[in-house]
Image (cartoon, rainbow, N blue to C red):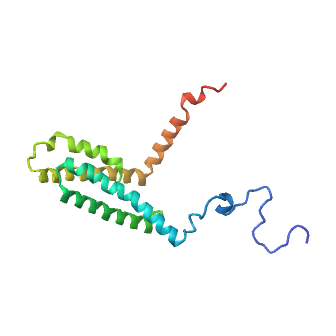
Amino acid sequence: MAGGGGGGGAPAPKADEPQPHPPKDQLPNISYCITSPPPWPEAILLGFQHYLVMLGTTVLIPTALVPQMGGGNDEKARVIQTLLFVAGINTLLQTLFGTRLPAVIGGSYTYVPTTISIILSGRFSDEPDPIEKFKRIMRATQGALIVASTLQIVLGFSGLWRNVARISVGISASHPSQHAFET
């Protein structure tokens, strides 16, 4: 039989179409791919490095904010414990249900300016008891975080953020300065 081979299988790929290559062939300088985990000794070292990076944010954020809120060392320790506990739960959920990557999800500096503005607002300055002031500021901060998180969840699941990203990318891609040297 000329040109075929029969059998009814999938047609052979055309010679001019690019064929997929394993990631190690595409990127020869990488040691392992996302589908191939590192060896255990290296994984333990990388996990410890990740822990040290996360520990910095977990300790620095409460160390900077809790004294401004009126809390002492006990309150600071409770906030650090809470951050570590929630980071563990978030990491477990991310590993089991999310992208399934072992990413540690800890504290973020994103909400620090908002928290500082809540701390410095005038509505908490009349509280004479520092522990009660800490509790009131913590409740206000938790409420603000719940509202902000709910907004992010709604934007993410509804697909609205995708539309906002398309608009903002179009605006930044068509900036007049990019066309300055075109003739």
Residue 90, located in which quarter of the rendered image?
Answer: bottom left
The single residue placed furthest to the bottom in the displayed view is: 7
Q: How many marks?
A: 0
Residue 97 seen from this side: no
Residue 116, located in which quarter of the rendered image?
Answer: top left
Image coordinates of residue 91 in percent, x first then y, are: 39, 64
| Residue name at image x 60 percent, y 25 percent | 180
Residue 137 lies, with reference to residue 178, above or below; the image says below
Judging depth in this view, the residue of 9 and 62 nearest the camera is 62
Residue 72 lies, with reference to residue 33, above or below; the image says above
Name the side, left or right, on which 129 lies relative to 159.
left
Judging depth in this view, the residue of 175 and 51 nearest the camera is 51
| Residue name at image x 80 percent, y 59 percent | 15
In which quadrant is the N terminus drawn?
bottom right
Name the side, left or right, on which 95 lies relative to 120.
right
| Residue name at image x 42 percent, y 52 percent | 156
Judging depth in this view, the residue of 13 and 124 nearest the camera is 124
Image coordinates of residue 48 in percent, x first then y, are: 43, 64
